[in-house]
Amino acid sequence: QVQLVESGGGLVQPGGSLRLSCAASGSVFSINVMGWYRQAPGKEREFVARITSGGSTDYADSAKGRFTISRDNAENTVYLQMNTLKPEDTAVYYCNAVVVVGTNIMGYWGNGTLVTVSS
């Protein structure tokens, strides 16, 4: 089992920055990939960024050049640095962890943290 707790959301003006954190606990040694997803009001949850245990990263087109995902393995924490925020970035941001054990793939989610971009 893996538990995820997000923090760092809030209200920010367009063009501003925020850094989200996701602290993992439990069977953290088994996590293969950690990532961030977001869900705006009335929309489906969508992928934002992911980072593998080896440090490889992947971003949605909407995040490229503005967002940076990183991880602190010693602290079992993943970060999402968000710069040049836009009103369309307003959403609840969810942390995700993927665990692969043999042929079993398990996904875990945090409860989310709200990011509001507005003047």
Image (cartoon, grey):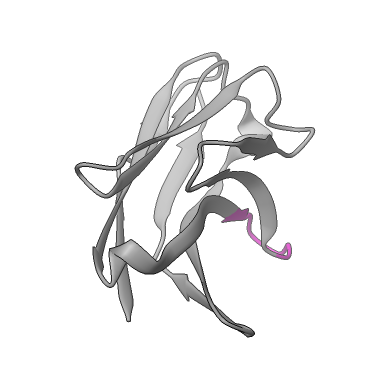
Magenta segment boundaries in residue numbering = 38-44
Identify the residue shown where x is 57% and y is 82%.
102
Q: Is residue 86 left or right of residue 79?
A: right
Q: Is residue 70 left or right of residue 89?
A: left
| Picture coordinates of residue 86, whole percent (x, y) | 63, 25
Of 68 and 104, nearer the camera is: 104
| Picture coordinates of residue 56, whole percent (x, y) | 59, 36
Q: Is residue 110 something one can see in this rendering?
A: no
Q: Is residue 101 left or right of residue 4?
A: right
Identify the residue shown where x is 67% and y is 63%.
45
Picture quarter with the N terminus: bottom left
What is the total number of numbered labels drawn onto the structure image? Answer: 0
Q: Residue furthest bottom?
A: 104
Image height of 102 relative to 90, above or below = below
Of 34 and 45, nearer the camera is: 34
Asked if the magenta segment contains residue 43, the reply would be yes
Q: Residue furthest front?
A: 102
| Picture coordinates of residue 88, whole percent (x, y) | 68, 36
Of 104 and 82, nearer the camera is: 104
Q: Main secondary structure of the magenta part?
A: loop
Image height of 115 relative to 109, above or below = above
Q: Is residue 118 left or right of residue 45?
A: left
Identify the residue shown where x is 46% and y is 73%.
108
Identify the residue shown where x is 47% and y is 48%.
53
